[in-house]
Amino acid sequence: MSTSGWEIRLSTTRSAPYFFNVDTRESRWEAPHGLSDAQIRALPGAHHIFGGAVGSAKVNGGDDRVRASHLLVKHSGSRRPASWKNPHITISEDEARHILEGYASEIGQDPTKFAELASKYSDDSSHERGGDLGFFRRGQMQKAFEDATYQLKVGEISGIVKTDSGLHIIMRTA
């Protein structure tokens, strides 16, 4: 994808970086589909994500950021029991857990398999990016998700994590 017009700005209300296209005036919290990490790092304002030195995983004030991918399986008790592939999710939490256990077993510790399955099966928009959620810091995700991610080492994959959104397996990528 072309980086034409895209830059990274800092939201004053959320104190979080977002992507803005100066040509189309479009803004979004997630990276535009198709941009590689290298292209994102080269955008004007990349320091808002990567800190003073582009490539560093630090942000203003030295707060550590992490990057993670996840595979989300929603169930009827999820905060919003709908997804891109199913407008009305009716499976139980136990059924969702069983499905996610199957995915976790198939993934093992193979990160390429993780992205492949997240692309096919994750119940949120991150499926478009193989489950990639981008960089975030403490306070930006649901606590259980955040705690699990920060406990992982880069390349490690979590067990099943329950949040209001549903059930996740998480892979820390930075």
Image (cartoon, helix red, strand yellow):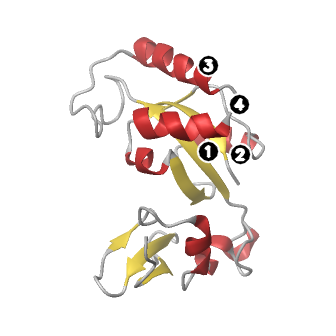
Q: Which mark is residue 116?
A: none
| Mark-to-mark CA distance, 4 and 1 | 20 Å
Picture layout, residue 27 above or below residue 120: below
| Mark-to-mark CA distance, 1 and 2 | 6 Å
Q: In this figure, which residue is indicated by the disc labeled 2?
A: 150
Q: In front of the other: label 3 or label 1?
A: 3
Pinpoint residue 153: horizontal percent, then vertical percent.
78, 43
Q: In front of the other: label 2 or label 4?
A: 4
Q: Which mark is residue 146?
A: 1
Q: Can residue 143 be seen in this view?
A: no
Q: Mark 2 or mark 4: which comes first in sequence?
A: 4
**Outermost residue toward the left?**
87
Pinpoint residue 108: horizontal percent, then vertical percent.
67, 25
Contact between marks 4 and 3 (CB within 8 A): the answer is: no
Query: Which residue is nearer to you in this view: 145 or 112?
Result: 112
How would you rate the neighbour count of disc 2 (Cα within 10 Å): few for under 14, some for 14-19, many for 20 or more? Answer: some
Q: In this figure, which residue is indicated by the disc labeled 3?
A: 105
Q: Which residue type carries mark 4? A: Gln
| Mark-to-mark CA distance, 2 and 4 | 18 Å
Q: In this figure, which residue is indicated by the disc labeled 4?
A: 109
